Image (cartoon, rainbow, N blue to C red):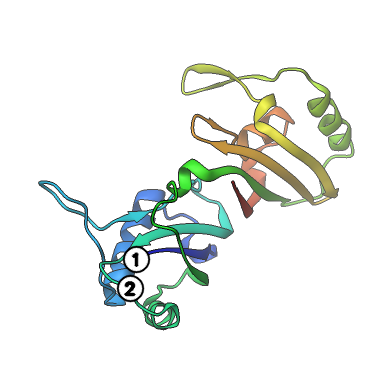
Amino acid sequence: MRIQIAFAKTEAMRYTGHLDLQRTWERTLRRARLPLAYTQGFKPHPRINLPAALPLGYTSEAELVEVWLQHDLPLDEIESALREAFPPGLQLKEIRLTDERAPKLQKRIRAAEYRVMFTSPAEAALQERVEELLAAPTLPRERRGKEYDLRPLIDGLRLVDDCTLWMRLTARPGATGRPDEVLLALGVDPHKTRIHRTALVIE
């Protein structure tokens, strides 16, 4: 049985990294006493797939995790067990059955949407910088010593009001846009913002 769980990562787990979140899910599923399926091989481990790693310091209402179980269970029974086992900082939103033959989630995610909240009202010139960025044919950037073009990774960007910026960035394997890089390209210090993921766009 393969299930997909939608959950929120709230303020209490804002500074929990991806690997620690993976361990948290393993502990939570074991506390819920669900019959986890395991990989084959010398060191079997639970079949849990947590795609689209959320950068440290971000919160989200749109996280997904895939879990494989040894046998079928009613979804309402799984939900009830998980709700009792959920740790502070995570919120269960939805559980759905997934086709066993479907590609893994990380191969199907195409984009992610974010809400960026400024700790103080944005500069008046920010709207102009947003327009200039969207009009730019290329946006050369460097990440981990490698040069890349940020512009194709930006699917959408707009200033909602003087305290909020919305962006939609690609999230395909090998082509993932980062909100902090967009902010830096706009001349905004990411440390003066709060970044919240609002959606994952799946093929």
Tell whether label 1 touches label 2 (CB within 8 Å).
yes
Q: Quadrant of the N terminus?
A: bottom left
State the residue at coordinates (26%, 71%).
30
Q: Amino acid at mark 2?
A: Asp
On the image, numbered disc 1 is attached to which residue?
1
Q: Earlier in the sequence, mark 2 or mark 1?
A: 1
Q: Which mark is residue 44?
A: none
Specify whether 144 is left or right of 141. Answer: left
State the residue at coordinates (35%, 50%).
19
Q: Give the image location of residue 131, x and y in percent.
A: 86, 30
State the residue at coordinates (49%, 68%).
96
Q: Give the image location of residue 145, x and y in percent.
A: 47, 18
Q: Give the image location of residue 196, x and y in percent.
A: 63, 54
User: Compared to 154, does 46 lie above or below?
Assistant: below
Local SS, label 1? loop
Q: Amino acid at mark 1?
A: Met
Specify whether 176 is left or right of 135. Answer: left
Foreground pick, 77 / 116: 77
**Disc 2 to disc 1, how far (Cα)?**
5 Å
On the image, numbered disc 2 is attached to which residue?
72
Local SS, label 2? loop
State the residue at coordinates (77%, 18%).
137
How crowded pointer 2 is (Cα within 10 Å; few <14, some 14-19, many 20+) is rated as few
Q: Give the image location of residue 150, x and y in percent.
A: 64, 25
Specify whether 49 is left or right of 136. Answer: left
User: Compared to 166, does 91 lie above or below?
Assistant: below
User: Compared to 137, does 131 lie above or below?
Assistant: below
